[in-house]
Structures are given as structure tokens and as C-alpha cells.
Amino acid sequence: MDKLKLPDMDYVALLPMLALFVAACLGVIIEALVPRRFRNIIQLVLSIVALAVAMFFVVKQSGEVVASKALTAGGAIMIDHAALFLQGALIVLGFVALLLFGERSLEFGGPFVAQAAVTVGSERDREQTGRELGSTETFPLALFSLSGMLLFVSANDLLTMFVALEVFSLPLYLLCALARRKRLLSQESALKYFLLGAYASAFFLFGVAMVYGFAKAVDFKAIHAEALLGEGNSLLLIIGLALLAIGLLFKVAAAPFHVWTPDVYQGAPTPVTAFMASCTKVAAFGGLLRVLYVGFDGLGWQFTPVLGAIAALTVLVGSILAVTQTDLKRLLAYSSVANAGYILIGVIAGQQLGLTSVLFYLVAYGFTVIAAFALISLVRDADGEATHLSRWAGLGARSPLYAGIFTFILLAFAGIPLTSGFIAKLSVFGAAIDGGQTWLVIIGVITSIILAFPYLRVVVMMWLSEPGESTPSVSIPGGLTSTALGIGTLATLVFGVVPGPLLDLAEKASSFVR
Amino acid sequence: MWSIVDGYLGSYAPLGLLALVGVLIVGGGFFANSLLRPRRPNAAAGKRDTYECGLDPVPGGWAQMQIRYYLYAYLYVLFAVEAVFLFPWAVVYLQAGLAVIAEMAIFVGVLALGLLYAWRKRALTWQ
């Protein structure tokens, strides 16, 4: 028998993922052994420590990237500049979102339910809604999900990518089902997300099989080489790419694969929605970028028109349907669909400029959206969060500070100057014009104007309506939510006023190693 | 004739012969049986009853299953999948040395963690 040759493993390069994974396993042990009332604080501290360690190694690693050494784990993982930037972004955004997970002062027991499987509306269910501490399994689940995302953005072959996709998706399905209030909506969202996510994964896997049929390999370098060579049945390659793209576009919530987004964003617990809207988007776009720019670079002239049509459809659907929404979480979900479209425009723009703008947009949008959901979790009545639009009328008179912050966040979504949203849109559109996609920019600008309407309607409602009987009060946030809100708002402001450092960082990161 | 056996598919020849012998034995058995047995095509009493394999069927195919089994199914899948990785590992671990043994220990440890969790959450007691 031949001598066994082990794949080379650069464990230092994998440490960010390993740190999160180990912390998640420790979290499971804590769930099994520590009394319930101590769990929340221990899990929170453990998660934050793990994220800090992971971030430390990402930063340390970013100084030592060499193209020849970036490939590790037997060719399955590529730690290049782009991967490290995305990993860093995921860790930071994950940290801010996890602060919301740990909040216990807004309502008794936190935002999560103790047992998700209890029949909705039963005696037992009413009892646990009011009086039981929420489950803290959410922390290990979120950490598992985050470590999967880190792997997803650095995967160098399609199979590793598929495994990572499942690792980060499965915990999300569970997390969606754990809302303390509005249990039925929450369970519905989890089931919908799970079923549609399973379909999307199947599409992705089928795409992997097709691409393997073409290239006889699943790693991006071989696929690229084979596509350049142009031998073999290129129909397989195109079908494979289309199926892969469906799987990935589902995750980024691009039309026509966006239908799950409003239901899931509405039903999931608000901290989880914040986590999904920021981190999942970063991870999914990171994966999409790597697939398109490393594996299928040679097919650019074939996928660009199709992706362009999808981007145009996404921004149109997202912005037009956002106008008709009456629930704030659904409104933000459609706004997130539209934003996916804008990021997609940057992806299509291509070149270094396009990549830079996408990376910048992902980070800027992630911070803003977390702040938005943090604020939504504050406006509540006896029934939990008051997300219906009419309930927010006159909020400006009740609590001007929070109405002011929310106005600022909405203006950032709308892309008003001095916010990060403006710089992000500007750089994406600039890159698209540079890449010869002017028609997309025109559609993008028109939809931005449409999209400004629902945002400004909320602003007008908050400030110019009289507070009525049903206007809920704003809860005084605990330290965690105010920290998350503060970080998100501050980042939105800072990236809008001095975007230079982040843009430089994104520009340095905008190169993939093949 | 022997050139076929020596050729590209030659190593499959014993397999083909074995299949042929199998078909002959089973087919021959059925044939001999049909020669020897009495012919009574009309159903006699008890002809279609369950014979030496399980319980008599209870009326209705839509029986309710006990939902608690799903936990055991989960735990079973956990360790069934573990075995898939343990078998190839068992072939090579002596050559590969300590690192590979440690890796498998970590893998099994992580799975055992799931069992620990299930046990502490009282998923293993029938309630």
C-alpha cells in the first residue's frame, strides 16, 4: 500500500474558524451543565471572548498573506485578502448582533422562548411566554453559524462551500423558530426558511454535480482552467453555474428567489433578523464573489447579462413592494431585498473597483441594518414589539432621541449624503458605470427614489403625527442593546463622513487568489 | 474462447459465472418446485395469511406512530454517520500516527458532546 500522505493543515490560518467552533462546543457543554439562570451571562461572555480571539487572529493573519501560502487544508480553504476581509466583517457584525441576543432587560427572560416545540396557545405556552427564562442555545447556534460563514467565504472548492453553506444555514433555521412573542409567525418563518433553504441547497448541490461533470474537479482553479481550455461539454458548465447561482442568490435574497425574505424577517426574533440581515448577506455575497470571480471568471460574458437582469428585477421588486408594506420588519425585509440588488450591481461591475464597492457596501449596510433592528426591538407594548407602521405615528413626540436615531438610519438606507448608505451606493454605481453597466445604474437611481418614499413616510409619521392612544412607549434599552445601537449608528455616521479608511481596507482586500 | 477471459473484462469472469450458477440454482429450484407441488389455484382457507413473519396486520394503513421515536432516530443518524468516517480511518490510522488518532478523537468527542447534551436535556429517558 502507498504511504499515506496527509493534507497540509495551516492551523494558524484556520484559527478564527476553530476558535468560534470550539466556543460553540463549549457553549453546548454549558447548556448541559450550568444552571439556567447563569447561562445567559456566561454564554455571552464566552461568545464575545471567542469573537475577540477570532478577530485577533484574522488581523494577525492579514499582515502575513502570501499568495503561495494562502491555500491550506489540502486545497480546500483559501485564506487570501478578500477572505480575511470578509471574515473580519463577519466577526465584527456577528459581535454587534450577539449583543442583541444577550439583552435581558427589555422583557423578562430575553427575546427567545424557552421551548420552541410547545403547542402555540396552549396553557403551557402562555406560561412559558410570561414566566420562563429564554433558551440560551441561541449563542452556540449563532457561533456555529458564524464559523460556517467564515468557512463559506474562504472555501476554495464547491464541496467545502456546500458543507459550509449547510453549517451556517441549519442553525439559522432553528434560530428563526425561537421568538418569545408571536410564536405562530416564528414557527411559520422557520418552516418556510427550512423548506425553501433545503430546495436552494439541492439546487446548489446539483450545480456542483454538473460542474464536476464538466471539469472533473470541484476546485475553482481547475474549473477556471478547464473553462479557459474550452473542451468538453460547455452546456454542463453553464447549467452548473446557473444552478449554483440559484442556490447562492437564494441566500442573498435576490428576486425571484426572495419570496422567503419578508416572512422570515418578520417571524424570526428581532436579534436573529439583525444577524441574518447583516451576516448572512456578507457570507452569501462573499461566496458568490468567489464563485464568479475565481471559478467562473472565463464565463463573464455569459453570466453578466443574466445577472444584470436579476439585479434589475431585484431592485425593482424590492423597492416597489416596500412601498406597500404596513409592517416595519417586512418593510426592512423588502429594503434588504433591494439592497441585495444594489450589491449585485457592484458584483456585475466587476474589476477591482466593483469588488471594493461590494465589500464596502456589505460592511456599511450590515452596521446600519443591525442598528435598525436594534431600534425596532425597543419600541414595544404589552404584546411585545409593536411593528405595525401605524403604531409608530407620533413617536417623535414621545421619545425624540430614538425617533431621531431611527430617522438617521432610514436616511442612511435611502442614501442621503453624510451617511454610509450614500457612499456605498455612490461607489457601487461608480463601479458599475466604469464597468459599462450604465443601464443598471439608471434603474438603480430610479429605484432609490422609489425606495426613499416608504422610508420618508415612516419619518413623516414619526415626527408629524400626533401620538395617539396606541402609540407604544419606547423601552429604556439595557446596556447591550444601546451598545449595539450605538455601534451601528456611529458606524453609519463615520463611514459616511470619513469613508476613506474602510474604502482603503476594502480596496486592499479586493483581490482573490486563484 | 479463453481470450475473452484474459481480456479487459477477464477479472469479472468468475463473477459472471457465479451469477449464472445462482440463476441456475434458483431457477432450477422454482422449476422443480412447480413439477412437484399440487396445483390448487383457488384460495384455500389460510392460504393468504401471514406465515412465520410478524404479526397479523391490524385494519387500516394509517396507524399513528409514537412521535418520541424521532429523538432516537436523530441520535441513531448521529452515530451512523460517525461510522462512515470511522471505517476508512481504521484502515490507515496506524500508518498516519498520533495526529490522525487525535483528530478522530476530537471528531468522536464532538459527537459525544451531542449525546451529553441529549442526556442532560433528558431526551434519553422515555417520558
Image (spheres, coloured by chain):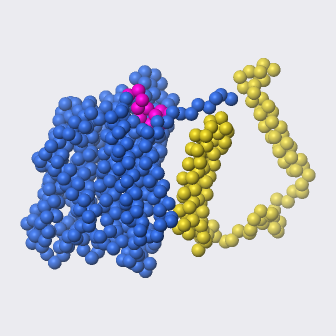
Chain colours: A blue, B yellow
**Quadrant in which the N terminus of chain A is drawn:** top right
Q: Is residue A192 above or below residue A183?
A: above
Q: Is residue B21 above or below residue A113?
A: above
Region of the chain picked out in magenta, as a range = A67-78
Instruction: Describe residue A92's horizontal placement relative to residue A177 as left or right.
Output: left
Q: Is residue A408 above or below residue A254?
A: below
Q: Residue A272, how many percent across, how many down?
A: 34, 59
Of A318 and A32, the residue lying toward us:
A32
Q: Please give the name of the residue rendered at 45% of the width and 27% of the height, measured from the top-left corner.
A: A222
Of A411 and A485, the residue lying toward us:
A485
Residue A22 visible in the displayed image: yes
Residue that extends furthest to the top in the rendered view of this protein: B3
Q: Please give the name of the residue rendered at 74% of the width and 68% of the height, measured from the top-left corner.
A: B55
Instruction: Describe residue A405's horizontal placement relative to residue A514 as left or right.
Output: left
Residue A192 visible in the displayed image: no
Residue that extends furthest to the right in the rendered view of this protein: B36
Of A356 and A322, the residue lying toward us:
A356
Q: Residue A124, how many percent across, how many down?
A: 44, 78
Q: Would residue A74 be counted in the magenta stretch?
A: yes
- Specify the quadrant of the image occupied by residue A246: top left
Numbered marks: total: 0
Instruction: Describe residue A303's horizontal placement relative to residue A14 as left or right.
Output: left
- Specify the quadrant of the image occupied by residue A356: top left
Q: Please give the name of the residue rendered at 20% of the width and 50% of the height, measured from the top-left corner.
A: A491
Q: Would residue B102 be counted in the magenta stretch?
A: no
